[in-house]
Amino acid sequence: MTKKLRKVLVANRGEIAVRVLRACREEGIETVAVYSDADRNALHVRLATEAYRIGPPPASESYLVGEKLIEVARAAGCDSVHPGYGFLSENGDFADACADAGLAFIGPTGEAMREMGDKVRARDRMREAGVPIAPGSDGAVEDPGELERIASEIGFPVMIKAAAGGGGKGIRIVHDAAELVRAFEMARSEAEKSFKSGAVYVEKFLAKPRHVEIQVLADHHGHVVHLGERECSVQRRHQKIVEETPSPIVDPELRSRMGEAAVQAAREVGYRNAGTVEFLVDAERNFYFLEMNTRLQVEHPITEQVTGVDIVRAQLEIAAGNPMTLRQEEIQPRGHAIEVRICAEDPANRFLPATGTIKQLDLPGGGRVRIDAGLYEGMKVDVHYDSMLAKLIVRANDRDEAISRMQRALGEFHVTGIKTNIGFLQRVLATDEFRSGTYDTGFIDRHQDELLAPPSDGAARDLSLLAAIVAHELRRLRSTAAAAPSAATGGRSAWRTALRRGRP
């Protein structure tokens, strides 16, 4: 008999909260949203069955307070908690606390999170499981002398990395011995501040690597499948900007080998629910384990677009204890999908986060265009949370068509009142290196000058401004017509009368 979750607390905000709420609604599951004072009027609050205040705007006093979230879940009669991504989504103690409170955590166990969240421990487990790992230290590096010995053995350049956390923090690339000790101290200091752990390890830095990840799903009954790869090499400060699937460098044979390695990684730690195993791929197409993200990924929609698998709904089914009916041989990706992250930031000013109020919002549309967002006109964007506003996703028959569709969609995406990275993304997709599919993780650094340069003749800016003015006027005319019914139409607006008569 198929089991079903009854009521889910969505322990997050923004577009991912909206994404989860919609999946729950389609499954007939009641939902509970939580919000800080800054999010009182947010879209995820409006979409939920119920909504509860959990504190002031700082995440440390609201979304990161696990006790408050569990208290709300129990008071509202929830049977489960979906953490989304970010915040407490990879906090093993929170997952354990949910289980102790009788709440199904829609994600892996706390133990699996801790195993894969500590990158030193994860490397050891992957080595034991036969998953390829890059040459480096066997554990955390304790002193500069040990670091110098390992670096000389594996050869420069090397990468010093925080054992805990993510998001590109606590990472230093070192090209020669003279830089080593200073980089070691800087990485330890940043790791301590960011993750309350100064533990770092070292591994060989691969020249021009590709960042390719494999999506996995695992149930409570030992069944694990992978959904193919995502190419995530367009990064700024180790944070992804553009993702696509399939990867331009992955052929069926490499996909099969990477998929098998990802499945083995999940089995090794008794993983369940949705997760992502990340790899670095070198110029010879050798791949090495990088880390495992024990949660739903920001970029999961592109995998959904090409496989037809709704990953969030699969999460709900797995958390309810149901066995997956999906079999590996049934997963046959079709077409090509690209996702870009629309962020409130100023690329011309070192990508500093932008704040303000969204005055006008015009979203793109058309066939095979998807937007995951929590945006609305009048929404205030402040400094308390991540700068990502929305995800724009397109699907097409092939890569060239997908790039063209994404450029068209970006050209229709207009936001006023705050600065965004839309123009920057358009320039990324227009480069020969991206279009050829030959880019790697150093792509943004190599092209920084041209990507940050304003249009030489101002034509693109003028065209965007003209489009925004036209959209504003059309909206004003519609609003005026709808609000001013005449006697000739019997109290109905001229717009509605025209539509009923079939006129354009």
Image (spheres, rainbow, N blue to C red):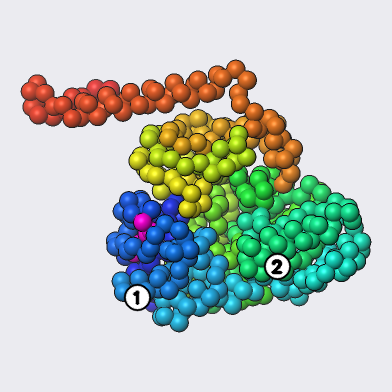
Q: 426 left or right of 146?
A: left
Q: Point out the stretch of residues depicted in magenta.
A: 32-37
| Residue under the point 62% across and 49% down | 240
Which quarter shows the C terminus? Answer: top left
Residue depicted at x 51% and y 47%: 388
Residue 36 among magenta residues:
yes
Reply above or below: 96 against 169.
below
Return the mark for residue 394.
Answer: none
Quarter of the figure with the N terminus: bottom left
Residue designated by label 2: 198
* Residue that label 1 marks: 74
Residue 234 drawn at (x, y percent): 66, 44
Answer yes or no: is residue 352 visible.
yes
- Image quarter for residue 266? bottom right
SS category of the residue bearing label 2 = loop
Q: What element carries label 1?
A: helix
Q: Which of marks 1 and 2 is nearer the N terminus?
A: 1
Say if mark 1 contacts mark 2, CB within 8 Å.
Answer: no
Q: Which amino acid does label 2 sit on?
A: Gly
From this viewpoint, is residue 328 visible?
A: no
Q: In front here: 365 or 417?
A: 417
Q: Residue 113, how many percent across, how many down? A: 59, 72
Q: Tell which tag, 1 or 2, sits nearer the viewer.
A: 2
Q: Residues within 10 Å of mark 2 (few under 14, many from 20)?
A: many
What x and y, as percent, mark residue 229? 64, 54
Rendering coords of residue 218 (x, y %): 56, 69
Residue 448: which quarter of the image? top right
What residue lies at 60% left-to-right and 23% top-to-bottom? 455
Tell whether 60 sits left or right of 154. Answer: left
